[in-house]
Image (cartoon, rainbow, N blue to C red):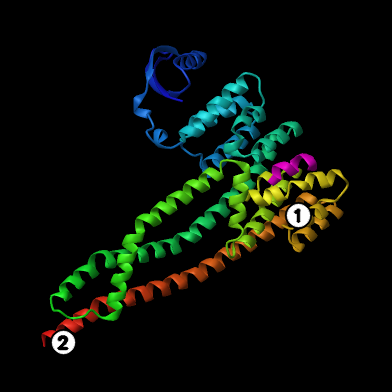
Amino acid sequence: MPYFLCRLATEEGKIISQSFLASSKEECRRYFEGEGFCVLSIKRDWRRLSWHGFLSPQRVKDKDFILVNQELIALLRAGYPALKCLEMVRQRVKNQTLQEILTQVENEVKGGKSLSEAFSPYENIFSKVYIASLLAGEQSGNLPGTLDRYVQYARIISQTKRRIRSALIYPSLLLFFSLGLMIILISFILPRFSSFYADFEAELPLVTRFIIVVADLLRRLLPAALFVLILVFLLVSRLKKNPRGARKVDRWKLKIPYAAIFWKEQAISLFSRTLGLLLEAGIPLLQSLPIAIQAVPNKFLAFSMLSVPEDIRHGQSLSDSLSRTGIFSDLSVDMIRIGETSANLPGMLKETAEVYDERIKGRIETLVNLIEPVIIIFMGVLVAIMLLSVYLPIFNIIRITR
């Protein structure tokens, strides 16, 4: 959706220019005339052209969407109508993709649709949990309260993602720099030493010969390795485009050491938190379960949980049906069973999610604490081998010249 530069005249006779996001010039004209301006001219604002959009679609960041909902909650609680709230929020949004979506939603609401109906086409961007929260808030008459619970939910999910990413940054940098050091030594330094050392008609030390052989082997295998990596990447990307292939890829992920228990605990946490949020918002259990299952990121685990709603329709309890999936641990099943028997299922689901969030946090910290010394030791051994391969020939040259 493009920006248009509009020259406007106010009732006092002042001339102002304003950049406005709209689908067409006619929409700009209708909007500003409705606001009481006299429209003098409208032309495309090429200064606001986003070249980023041509290269790749701009994402809606979690923090931007959370901020939009926080502002929306504040305006709704202040008594503003939903349409006016959307208009005020949209004008302060910086992310162009989010601004375009809010513009389309605003137009849909003007046409008579509810907020949940207007946001429904964008459920792949904002998740079905958000659409369900809007629907529950509209049905219960407490939209600000429901959105506030969703914001808390989204903030926790965003913090978990950020924690995982930040925990992996330091080990990744260590590994990157160690590999970079090895490539520099193998590609530039050692070949010069070998040619220089050959002038003295002496044999290179064993460690230096070993490094040179490895370097030659890596140089020969590098094109084939890159080709295989690209082929695997394309194959995985193609598989993930259909549900069956995505389930296969996620099933392979569960075979990675240490990954299976992490994915299962993450599934328990997200499922419990999402289901608790939806039940607390007033959505019935059978309607909430499919949405909560879709919140599980691992498609294979989510597919294994599809039988839960059908089991409940046949009279089983939620705890028993979750236990049959083989995903939920005894602790999580017991906590959910306590919630069912005490008529506090949403509260116990939230407690279950918090317990497993802490366990995930502990596992991430343990993994990072294990990875860091391993990479440091690897770098130390690598640097030691490289130094030996460089300095031993120097010492031999000194000995030969004497």
The magenta span reads 281-293
Tell whether label 1 touches label 2 (CB within 8 Å).
no
Q: Which residue is mark 2?
A: 399
Query: What is the number of the mark on residue 325?
Result: 1
Q: Nearer the viewer, residue 384 or 334?
A: 384
Of the image marks 2 and 1, the number of the one nearer the N terminus:
1
Q: Identify which residue, 102 or 86, lies in the foreground.
A: 102
Q: Residue at x 60, y 46 (%)?
A: 246
Q: Quadrant of residue 195?
A: bottom left
Image location of residue 121, percent across then percent down: 61, 30
Quarter residue 330 falls in = bottom right
Near mark 2 (Cα within 10 A), the count class, few <14, some 14-19 or many ≥20, is few
| Drawn side of residue 289 relative to residue 357, left or right | right
> What's under tag 2, amino acid-wise?
Arg
Magenta segment, prevailing SS (helix, strand or loop)? helix
The x, y position of residue 224, in whole percent, is: 38, 55
Q: How many marks?
A: 2
Q: Nearer the viewer, mark 2 or mark 1?
A: 2
